Structures are given as C-alpha cells and as structure tokens.
Image: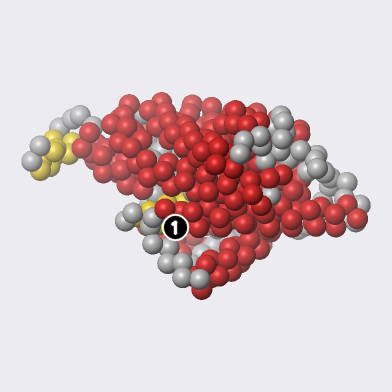
Amino acid sequence: MAHIPDGVLSPPVLIGGWAVAAIGVGLALRRLDESRIARTAILSAAFFTVSLLMIPLGPTSVHLLLSALMGLSIGIAAIPAVMVALALQMLLFGVGGLTTLGINTVNIALPGVLIGLLAGPWISRLSVPQAMLAGGLAAAGAVALTAGGVVLALLLSHSAYSVSAQVLGITYVPLLLAEALVTAFAVGFLKRVKPEVFPAGLPRPLAAE
Amino acid sequence: MSITTVTTDSESPRFRLEALDPRTRVLSATALVIAVVALNSPAALCLALAGALALAAAAHRSLAGLGRRLLHIEGFLLVLLVLLPLTTPGTPLIAVGPLAASSEGLMLALTLALRIAVCVTAVFALLGSLDPVRLGAALGRLGLPARLVQLLLFVSRYSTIFRTEARRLVEAMRARGFTGRPGLHSLRSYGNLAGMLLVRALERAERVDAAMRCRGFSGRLPLSESGGWGRGDALFGAAVAGAALLLLAADRLA
C-alpha cells in the first residue's frame, strides 16, 4: 500500500526522504548497542512476518503495516527495522523501490515512532480494555499519517498527481480499520500474556529487564 | 537492437552475473535506477527497457518471474495510471460520457508505466538472485553501518523461521475451525496471532541473546568474504556507467 516504486516521485522528494530516513536510522543505531541488537532484530523479523500475512477484509485483503505496534514496542528502532524490511521486500518480491527506500521508510516508520512516543508511556499503565482502545487509536493515527505522507510525496512530486493523490487517500480507509482492530486485539493479547513487550516509562528501544 | 548491446557487449559471451562481486551488482543497480528515474522521454525509456530486458536475459533470470513482478501492480499505482489520463487537462483523445482522456495525460501515464517497468526489470536482473546474506556482506563492505547490516542479516534469517511458525499457527487455527472469513472475529484472531508471534519472538530473542553473549558477542559479526573486485567487475561497471550516460544523453536529445 505504501510501497511507492521507483520512477513515480521527483528527485527533490526522493532526496528529502533519504535525508530524513538517514537521520532517523542514525539516531536509532546510536541507541542500539550490542545488548539490544538481537532482541530488536528478532522482534523486527516477527513484525516483518506478520506484515506479509494477507488479512481478509470485505471483498479484498490487506497487508498490515503494524507501525504503531512497532513504535510502541521497539521505539525509534522501528525506523531501521522498517528500512531493512522494505529492502528485503524489494529484493524478494520486487515491491517498492531503490530510490524510494528513504521516503517509504519515512512514510511507514516515522508515524509509528511518533505515535509510540506519545502513547508508549500510557500503554504500560492502562488497564487491558483501555490499552486496547489506545492501541487501536494509535494504529489508526499512524495509518492516517502514513496515508498523508504518501499523498504529500505525490503532490510535491508532480502537479498532475493532485486528483489521483486525493483519491488515493481514500483507499487507505479499509487498511486503517483493519490495522486499528488487529493492533487493538494484539495489544490486548500482549497486555495479558507478556506486558513487558511495552517498556514502562520513557520509550527506549526495549528497556532492559 | 543495436542499443541493447550497450549494456552487454563488453562482457564475454560467457557472462555470468554470479561471477561479479555483489558490490558491483548493488552499485550498478543503484546507478541504473537513478539514471532511469531522471528520464522523461518515452523514446529513451523504450531504449532503457530494451537494455534492461537484455540484461535480465544475459543474467539468465527467469522471464516468468519477471512477468509476475511487472504484473504485480500495487493498488495505488492502478489508481494513478487510470486517473492520470482522465484528470490531466489537455487535448481530449477518447471521450466516454463525461470522462475524457487527454493525450497529455495518456503520455504521462505511459512514461510513468515505462519508468516503473525499467526500474523493476533492472532491480530484478541485478539483485533478484542475490541472497540476503551476500547482500548484507556487500553492503557492509560498501561502508554501511555495521548495526544496520546486522539488522538486515537477523531479519532475513529469523523471518524465514517466523514464517514457518506463522504457518503452523494458522494451521492450528484452521484445525479449530478458523475460516478466515472477513469480520471482527477474523481480525481478533489475527490480532492474537500477531501477539503470539511477538511473544515467541521475544522469548526466542532472550535465548539467542544469551547464546550470543555466551560466545562473547561484542557487537561485531564476521561478514562472509567473497573474492574482491576483478576485471569483470571493472568491465561491467564501465558498461553500466556508459549505458546510464547514453540514456541520459538520449533523453536530452529526444
């Protein structure tokens, strides 16, 4: 859904995407020392796997982005995790692109990280139903921001994209609903079974036990 | 077909992609895609497509696999390709009721489709058969941060494990009567499935982390070595650079 291929966007947008992605990756890697790398990477692999599942929804099916859940559980490390997942998807399935890897990473990961920063400190304190609600809202917000990012990238690239970009924004509604509900249920499950997935206090990538 | 030889004529007839250093493949794919993204004329893009197809053929990549990748159109791309002719102002070409497709819009959609196709073909030809482990090693030797490379290696390794685990979980759900019919129950089941996979991932991560510490992991993983730059790499790199410059020149002239 948010995998913009090579050849659609204009060079300034591509370069801007890479710049933001590079800053995000740099910040995240600084915090990712050798005691955290295995945990973060293995959780990232699990997120990548779930995002490859086809979730049936009405007459169609969608792939989830799970960015809010990533932001809530691994924090800013979601940025390099998403970049790596996108690179693998391009290599293995040919979706997405090389030049768009930066902007796609920003569009998918940044909303999750920002929302994780906002909602993270709450999730660990709330009761299960409240946390489910917060998780669902966080996921809906993250998908809305991702859709906004994709639309903005198109609008900034070419004036001819303006109508198509607005129509595109609407196509994100089914994904937003599926993402919100699945995330809410996943948060509920994790709160009951393994609450330490959501680090308490300030969101650092997987606070040590 | 004279132009199609631009990307391939410098190689010996026994051109083998696998003989190249993976770094050459990564750099060549990047250079080609960057050049193609800058192209605007349909003629130059057609040349580029012919060259990319020749490259895929020379690399002995399966054409069926390429066809699948080209036909796999993201939903949003479909919206773009259908709406561009209808919404771009210009000379109407075909009119169906209130909708009119302008020739300018059709041209825009055509160049867009061509650009995407060339990039997909080039990436498929050069990187499609590259194993993630070799890609990681190549990126590390090209100077990418070691932790980013480790992340790539870990994710590619463990996502294959979690894929079998997810398949097992879905099978178990099916055995208990899960049909995957759209609805709230289905979404709840997928939410639990995602949660379960994360729980198992966290538990596995603790075991892996302990095992790595016990072997003295200090933040570095040795990258698999694979030869070095050779004469073939130089020739291939020069051919790719020549092809990229030629395409950019053709784009200016067209």
A84 over B159 or under it: above or below = above
In the visual, does B41 lie left or right of B85? right
Position in image of residue A86 (x %, y %): 56, 47
Q: What element carries label 1?
A: helix
Q: How many marks?
A: 1
Tag 1: Cα neighbours inside 10 Å, few (<14), some, or many (≥20)? some
* Residue, disc 1: B186
Identify which residue, A33 or A196, lies in the foreground: A196
Q: Is residue B139 visible?
A: no
Position in image of residue A138 (x %, y %): 52, 35
B203 over A113 or under it: above or below = below
Position in image of residue A28 (x %, y %): 70, 34
Quadrant containing the C terminus of chain A is top right
Identify which residue, A55 or B37, lies in the foreground: A55
Q: Which residue is drawn at 51% across and 38% down?
A: A133
In the visual, does B158 lie left or right of B58? right
Give the residue type at disc 1: Ser
In terms of image quadrants, where is residue B103?
A: top left
Position in image of residue A22 (x %, y %): 64, 32
Identify which residue, B163 or B10, lies in the foreground: B163
Q: Is residue A121 visible?
A: yes
Q: Which residue is drawn at 56% across and 57% down?
A: B193
In the visual, does B207 lie left or right of A109? right
Q: Mark 1 — on which chain does it sit? A: B
Q: Residue at x 31, y 56 (%)?
A: A59
Quadrant containing the N terminus of chain A is top left
